[in-house]
Amino acid sequence: MKKFTNAVIYGHKDANEILVENGVIKAIGKDLGPADEVIDLEGKLVTAPYVDPHLHLDYVYTLSELGKEGAGSGTLFEAIEMWPKFKETLTVEGVKTLALKGIMDEVSQGVQYIRTHIDVTDPKFTGLKAMLELREELKDIVDIQIVSFPQQGMYTYKGGRDLVEEALKMGADVVGGIPHYEPAREFGEKSVHDIVELALKYNKLIDVHCDETDDPHSRFVELLNALVLMEDYGEKTTASHTCSFGSADDSYAYRMFDLFKKSRMNFISCPTENAYLQGRQDTYPKRRGLTRVKEFMEYGINVAFAQDSINDPWYPMGNGNMMNILDNGIHLAQIMSPAEIDKDLDLITYNGARCLNIQDRYGLDVGKDANFIVLNGDSPFDVIRNRANVLASVRKGEYLFKQKPVEYEVNVLKGRLI
Ligand code: FE2
């Protein structure tokens, strides 16, 4: 029996201790009695681990790799032009090496659950094979869900839909799609029907790159929502991005809030990525690129934040730091009232877990795996305001990592006031 004591425990106001037995939370409370090992968390905030519910692990660090191959200055358009050529050169080992680097960026900063979109518009399925291996090899340190994602669409060439289905048969967990990228609206709609049909056929989750455009007429989210509402499949479905919903007319948006609430569909916003990518054709005023995160929260519609990219042709930055994502997101979505701040950490923890449909086994509750992180602060407000780093990550009761407190060789105040 192991006891973590002297902690501020997120969602458990009157508790300061977590008792762990065989990797499972046995109790959360006060004065929980003796244990074989007692670990003092020194008054720090403990939360459930970070969840990154949308990340392209087969792309991470490919921007730098493209540069090595002579992609030039590594600008967005140069890199995108190079991508199909680069894709042909991928090997399973090569993808694994870069993906592992991206996974370690995230896990070493408190993430223990990742959903990754893997491009399956490759008849050799190189990225998918690499990720299926990593999902198994790394399961003790991180849970990975794989989306069968057609980056080049299902209907921009013949056979795209079948590649998505084949990837599901090979072991992908989630059906993906990109209807706004299909070459005509009808094909976008057809792809949304396909996505739902495939999910039902193979009993898979759904996560669609949906309306990632500023065009307010891109409304595939409406069809996706209607289909999963009819099938009672909303809790297993996520609409990622929905940037166009941020540009839609209010009368349309408020009708959709009611329908989204009915289906219980999930949403993911990628604040840094979409702030960077959207609004490119705007002069001024320039749109922020985000979906209506604040209103989703007000309506009780589940919404989470995600990293999306780490140093790939779509976004040069990204380092797997979910607190950075949260910090950007709460600024862009203007969610900083005291009541909102109390719930903001959910955007990178519990809300992401609902997108992954793992809410039954995720979180700080008795009977669940003892997975949690320790943040360098003593309240949600404190850790968000200071963009606190993760001091430790615990999985099944054991440390994945633990940091030493920062030590200065020279203290700014030494010899001045003290
Ligand atoms: Fe994405």
Image: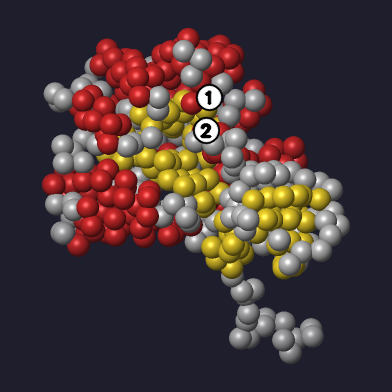
Q: Residue at x 74, y 89 (%)?
A: 415
Q: Which of marks 2 and 1 precedes in the sequence?
A: 1
Task: Kindly indicate the quadrant of the structure image that contains residue 80.
Answer: top left
CA–CA distance between discs 1 and 2?
A: 7 Å
Q: Badges 1 and 2: C-beta atoms under 8 Å apart?
A: yes
Task: Kindly indicate the quadrant of the structure image that contains residue 194.
Answer: top left
Is residue 208 among what the camera can see?
no
Task: Give the vertical position of 137 relative to 258 (above or below).
Answer: below
Q: Residue 399 shows which numbered tag?
A: none
Camera-side residue: 37 or 230?
37
The number of callouts visible is 2
> In what element is the residue under mark 1?
helix
> x, y percentage for residue 397?
62, 58
Q: Residues within 10 Å of mark 2 (few under 14, many from 20)?
A: some
- For this orientation, the residue located farthest to the bottom is 415
Is residue 71 among what the camera can see?
yes
Q: Which residue is mark 1?
A: 235
Task: Give the vertical position of 217 relative to 208 (above or below).
Answer: above
Relative horizontal placement of residue 62, taking residue 265 as reference (left or right): left
Q: Which amino acid, by three-letter code, is at mark 1?
A: Glu
